């Protein structure tokens, strides 16, 4: 029976230990400890999306050198202090606007899965093994395609569930890493995130996966419209048109491409000005 527990692991590419980054770290006097400490920090921040901070009530408290040394007790204060400086120099860690240190490549090195998702994954694998081989002169291709589509929908639903599991085993609230990533992406690409848009964003996260919301932000950035209202408009259109997956967006974009003998459609920025009358509200 699924309990909602989440399990984490470090996932390393086969080129990780031979990368220039690791070569540089290992070339330092205490380099081996720097590599191990970095991996430990990845696991220490599994509930905060790579952010070196902890939460007490509504207060976010950044890790300092002493806190890191207490959490990773095999390393001296001097080793931790120098390691953090080296990480910053080579881009492994950066300091966020609120003063919290963030692991830049966290999502590339840490994986996670709930026991519910693990069960569903095993079920999908078992069903896939039970599918009969493809027959060229039968209607079997259509059946396989239907099963594949159902699996994609099921996978999307599971990702959506995982994105919304924000409670530890002991029931205490955790930092919402997905929400933080969306807001950080908005600020990096479009500017300051308007506080009044927070409720709208939370509402969209009940409908779309975080990946789709991040894609809407990227589309706004590419269009050169640095406004929340434009991102909100993209999501409204997707909702009305039944878009629910990244594949749906791609199919929609393909359908909207003008034919070679047609006039190109208005740009996204022109669409925005046409709909909103050139308003400057965020």
Image: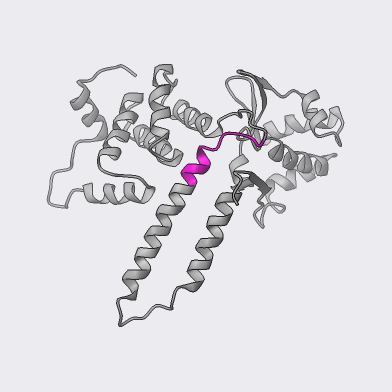
Residue depicted at x 74% and y 43%: 24
Magenta-colored stretch includes residue 131: no
Residue 181 x %, y %:
52, 32
* The C terminus: image quadrant: top left
Residue furthest bottom as drawn:
137
Residue depicted at x 43% and y 28%: 202
Location of residue 87 (image quadrant)? top right
Can you see residue 253? yes
Q: Which residues are magenta?
A: 159-169
Is residue 270 found left or right of 74 in the rendered image?
Answer: left
Vertical placement of residue 140 versus 280, above or below: below
Residue 153 x %, y %:
40, 53
Residue depicted at x 61% and y 36%: 104
Q: How is the image coloured?
A: one colour
Q: Which of the pair 168/70 is nearer the observer?
A: 168
Residue furthest front as drawn:
1
Can you see residue 227? no
Residue depicted at x 40% and y 36%: 213
């Amino acid at each position: 029976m699924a309990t909602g527990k989440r399990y984490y692991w470090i996932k390393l590419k086969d080129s990780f230990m031979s990368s220039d980054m690791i070569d540089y770290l290992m070339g330092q006097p205490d380099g081996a400890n720097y590599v191990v400490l970095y991996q430990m920090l990845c696991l220490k921040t599994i509930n905060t999306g790579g952010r070196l901070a902890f939460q007490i009530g509504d207060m976010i408290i950044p890790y300092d050198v002493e806190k890191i040394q207490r959490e990773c007790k095999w390393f001296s204060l001097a080793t931790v202090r120098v390691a953090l400086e080296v990480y910053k120099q080579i881009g492994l860690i950066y300091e966020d606007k609120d003063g919290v240190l963030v692991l830049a490549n966290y999502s590339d090195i840490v994986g996670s899965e709930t026991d519910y998702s693990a069960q569903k994954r095993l079920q999908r694998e078992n069903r896939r093994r039970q599918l009969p081989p493809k027959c060229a002169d039968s209607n079997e291709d259509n059946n396989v395609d239907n099963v594949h589509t159902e699996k994609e929908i099921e996978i999307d639903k599971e990702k959506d569930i995982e994105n919304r599991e924000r409670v530890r085993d002991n029931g205490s609230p955790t930092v919402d890493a997905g929400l933080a990533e969306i807001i950080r992406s908005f600020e990096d690409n479009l500017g300051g995130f308007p506080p009044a848009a927070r409720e709208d964003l939370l509402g969209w996260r009940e409908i779309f996966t975080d990946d789709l919301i991040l894609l809407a932000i990227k589309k706004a950035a590419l269009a050169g419209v640095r406004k929340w209202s434009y991102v909100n408009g993209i999501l409204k259109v997707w909702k009305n048109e039944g878009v629910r997956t990244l594949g749906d967006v791609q199919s929609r974009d393909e359908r909207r491409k003008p034919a070679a003998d047609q006039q190109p459609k208005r740009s996204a920025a022109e669409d925005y000005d046409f709909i909103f009358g050139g308003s400057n509200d965020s």
